[in-house]
Amino acid sequence: MTSPFLNNLPADLLIRDDAAEQRLLREYGAVFLARGGVVPPSRVIFKDEDEVASFQSRLDVGVSEIAGLQMELQSVAMSQLLEAADEAQEAGLSITPRGSDSARRNYHGTVELWHSRVEPALVHWVSKGRIEQEHAEFIRALQPHEQVSEVFKLEEDGIYFAKDLSKSIIYSVAPPGASQHLSLLAFDVREFDEPRVREILARHRWYQTVVSDLPHFTYLGVDQSDLAGLGLKNVTHLEREFWIPNV
Ligand SMILES: [Zn+2]
């Protein structure tokens, strides 16, 4: 328990003692170190709409129209994003949202996205004989947050739930209640493929923190030179740099 990552987690972060939460903390955990005037999420997994709404009501929220879409982020994260967008524009580039749900999401939105991966995967794996029909029905009947550990268990046997069915669902969509978008500290960037855009975002403290989620950026509120000291490590994947928990 002496890793800088664990030591730098917020004191009030509720981490339940189950395998799914432990795994999500390792995979998505960079956001819990967010600082510099923003509030990190208070749960590894928000259990329902009430928990999300109560957390979101504590936040200082900045609202801005970007490329015709109304976006909401924590204020400091929003002002840094707008500065990055100005800088991009001066360089003949742009930083805009991929869609209307690129910034703030509510719990219900994360549940819909989760189902959009789980349901087709269940149908596929039942048709391949890898999951019994009754087991699929059992999973369908669970509450969304209860489905997470069931899906993780199947993935241990190579029964993957990402959109392309070749990797874990968590590289395709966040489990319900675990999305960084619920914390208003994440933004999905349309121009994610442009290296200069990624550089500009990093200079404004927006980093990639979820390996394989290429358009997804997270506001961490510190300079790049401070990330390692906080307990994050730099991982290169598809020529991009990701900052993930060093645990
Ligand atoms: Zn995202």
Image (cartoon, rainbow, N blue to C red):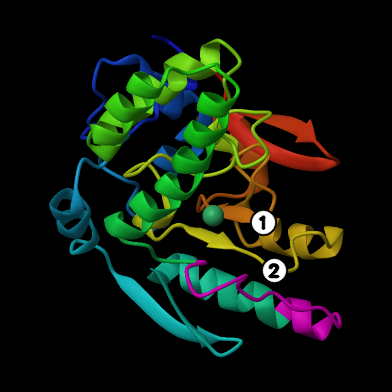
Callout 2 touching callout 1 (CB < 8 Å) = yes
Please tell me the numbered disc located at residue 215.
1
Near-viewer residue (12 or 236)? 236
Type of residue at label 1? Answer: Pro
Q: In this view, does 208 lie to the left or right of 103?
A: right
Type of residue at label 2? Answer: Arg
Q: Quadrant of ligand 1?
A: bottom right
Circle 1 sits in a helix, a strand or a loop, which is it? loop
CA gap between label 2 and label 1 equals 7 Å
Q: What stretch is highlighted in magenta?
A: 87-102
Q: Residue at x 60, y 22 (%)?
A: 128
Please tell me the numbered disc located at residue 190.
2
Does the beta carbon of the residue at mark 2 sit less than 8 Å from ligand 1? no
Q: Is residue 132 left or right of residue 146?
A: right
Placement of 227 over or under 167, stated as above or below: below
Quadrant position of residue 90 = bottom right
Please tell me the numbered disc located at residue 203.
none
Q: Where is residue 146 in the image (x, y as percent from the top left)?
A: 26, 29
Q: Position of residue 84 (x, y in %)?
A: 66, 72
Does the beta carbon of the residue at mark 1 sit less than 8 Å from ligand 1? yes
Residue 20 highlighted magenta (yes or no): no
